Amino acid sequence: MKLTRVAAAAATAMTALALAVAGPLGLGTANADVPPDHAWIIPEPALSGANDFTCRPTAAKPNPVVLVHGLGATASENWYFLAPYLAGQGYCVFAKTYGMDPRYPSRGGLKPMNESAAELSAFVDEVLAATGARKVDIVGYSEGAIMPRWYLKFLGGAAKVDHFVGWAGPNHGTNIHGITDLRTAVPGWDGHLGQYCGSCPQFMPGSDFLTALNADDETPGTVHYTVIATKYDELVTPYQTSFLTGAENIALQDVDPANYAGHASMANDPTTFALTLKALAAHGH
């Protein structure tokens, strides 16, 4: 009984930590998704540069870009800077706050990732139907760099996506703050954590979700995969866990040794943006 209480308390604490550090604080919630009065810290502005369903792709930029946020974040929090930046480059840009648990108003990414992948599938179909495009590109951040891989691999997404750019996704699990040691020491850790955050146990090394996702081909289909990681990532550790076999794997500091972006600050990092643009323009798998 004592261990059960310890496990529940630890799981609750780790869920609170995940929600607190998931994204840059004080930046928006898309008004199409969650009312601003549900924002944390300060009122959050609506996301600009995204979700104009009258936007039509051009010959130069034929693929709409779907942005997928991270754990405990929202569309506007993670894409407050990138969405208008991409729109200014001529892209049709779309973003949705997914995986919302009613117990945590205005927080996304908390449902099991296989469930969120089904939400992403429906959203991509909506974007394709509205824009008349044949395929989309996806840019994902943190959880958003993992969850879409389930869509690509198991839900037919590889036939509808041209480029997938993942920022700082713990594709092989993360040992954030020694969590794997705590997980080993506390019986029933995954079950207790899953009661508070459906996606959280799926980030653990060796989880059933990651085992299925990484079995056989880690980069299926003809999709062009790019992974961008930072050596100063404080949440995805070690940072190499992001890298995928078959992807173009890039560490920010190998491109710009003076870049000190951490996990959260990738969301407004010029080098990350430039590498993302380059990846979206790439050809071939």
Image (tube, rainbow, N blue to C red):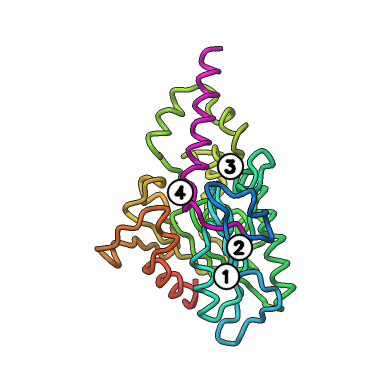
Kindly tell me whether residue 215 is visible in this rendering.
no
Start-end of magenta stretch:
1-29
Could you say where residue 164 lies in the image, as x and y percent from the top left?
53, 65
At label 2, which amino acid type do we have? Ala
Residue 69 x/y as whole percent: 55, 56
Residue 62 quadrant? bottom right
Question: Label 1: few (<14), some or many (≥20) within 10 Å?
Answer: many
> Which residue was labeled with disc 3?
199
In the displayed structure, would residue 74 be above or below residue 201? below
Q: Residues under labels 2 and 3: Cα distance?
A: 26 Å
Q: Secondary structure at mark 3?
A: loop
Is residue 222 visible in this depiction of the protein? yes
Determine whether the residue tagged by mark 4 lies in a helix, strand or loop: loop
Residues marked 2 and 1 touching at CB (< 8 Å): no
Q: Which residue is mark 2?
A: 46
Badge 3: few (under 14), some or many (20 or more) residues near its Cα, within 10 Å?
many
Considering the image in quadrants, where does the N terminus appear?
top right
